[in-house]
Image: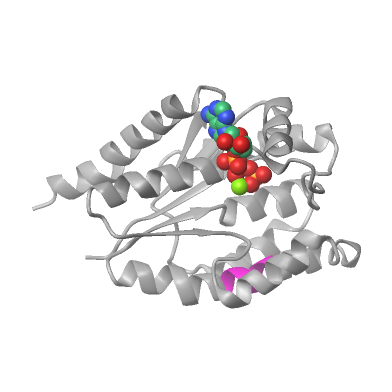
């Protein structure tokens, strides 16, 4: 049977990487084979493009070019990592996916949604997530967490944007969640880590594992 595809979305420091990895551990404990991956990146070709995007070199080329670079990375990621794993029955958990592009490049970067949707059709096609978590935290909480995690290293291309930018990001994810309630679940990321993890697990159990055990 084909595996399930789960993505984690949300602003900087909202807990995506933490909870993607906690969920992967929990599935592994149930003997569910799963692949933990991330965007931009997640495959050899895509990791090269990640470096170009996050270094900020592509920013002067404009939001459209940046969007096309993300799409190039995603195409490689879907074909080389996600699709083969799902086809082999493994579960795939991705730290960011299409919703990040819709919000960062679409809602905030003002890239035409038609371009974004066309690129999605080419790169993602039918490989849509079965379930997406949007981790929602106030901007100051997210940026403080991202900063303390980073230590003395430099902020990346997106982390160094203004507070207003991050507020808009947060709203952007919430709007997407309202539009696609069947796929996207918003989780309050302010709660302690274990509480957040438990809410995520309950959702996975009821939406994906429950459906599986109920099937004939
Ligand atoms: N619920 C939580 N309560 C307290 N701290 C948390 C919680 N979730 C994550 N953290 C901590 O906040 C920091 C940022 O979390 P994490 O790296 O998972 O966020 P992220 O969404 O992946 O961020 P980025 O977008 O920058 O990659 C980490 O140090 C993590 O341990
Ligand atoms: Mg992260």
Q: Is residue 53 left or right of residue 74?
A: right
Q: Which residues are magenta?
A: 70-75
| Res 50 quadrant in image | bottom right
Residue 93 is situated, as x and y percent measured from the top left of the image, at 43, 54
| Secondary structure predominantly adopted by residues drawn in magenta | helix
Residue 137 is situated, as x and y percent measured from the top left of the image, at 62, 28
Q: Is residue 59 left or right of residue 135?
A: right
Q: Residue at x 80, y 61 (%)?
A: 55
Q: Residue furthest front?
A: 152
Residue 181 is situated, as x and y percent measured from the top left of the image, at 45, 38
Q: Nearer the viewer, residue 42 or 25?
A: 25
Q: Residue furthest left?
A: 216
Q: Residue at x 54, y 46 (%)?
A: 17
| Res 1 quadrant in image | bottom left
Judged from the image, the quadrant occupied by ligand 1 is top right
Scheme by which the image is coloured? one colour
Q: Is residue 150 left or right of residue 96?
A: right
Q: Nearer the viewer, residue 17 or 133?
A: 17
| Res 72 quadrant in image | bottom right
């Amino acid at each position: 049977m084909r595996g399930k595809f789960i993505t984690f979305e949300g602003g900087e420091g909202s807990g995506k990487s933490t909870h993607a990895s906690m969920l992967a551990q929990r599935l592994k404990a149930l003997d569910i084979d799963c692949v933990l991956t991330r965007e931009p990146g997640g495959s050899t070709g895509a990791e090269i493009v990640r470096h170009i995007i996050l270094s900020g070199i592509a920013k002067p080329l404009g939001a459209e070019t940046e969007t096309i670079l993300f799409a190039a990375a995603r195409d490689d990621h879907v074909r080389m990592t996600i699709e083969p794993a799902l086809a082999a029955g493994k579960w795939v958990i991705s730290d960011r996916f299409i919703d990040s592009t819709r919000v960062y490049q679409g809602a905030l970067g003002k890239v035409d949604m038609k371009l974004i949707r066309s690129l999605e059709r080419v790169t993602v096609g039918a490989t849509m997530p079965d379930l997406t978590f949007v981790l929602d935290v106030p901007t100051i909480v997210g940026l403080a967490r991202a900063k303390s995690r980073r230590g003395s290293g430099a902020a990346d291309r997106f982390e160094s944007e203004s507070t207003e930018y991050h507020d808009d990001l947060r709203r952007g994810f919430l709007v997407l969640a309202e539009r696609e309630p069947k796929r996207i679940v918003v989780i309050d990321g302010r709660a302690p880590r274990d509480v957040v993890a438990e809410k995520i697990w309950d959702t996975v159990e009821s939406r994906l594992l429950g459906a599986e055990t109920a099937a004939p």
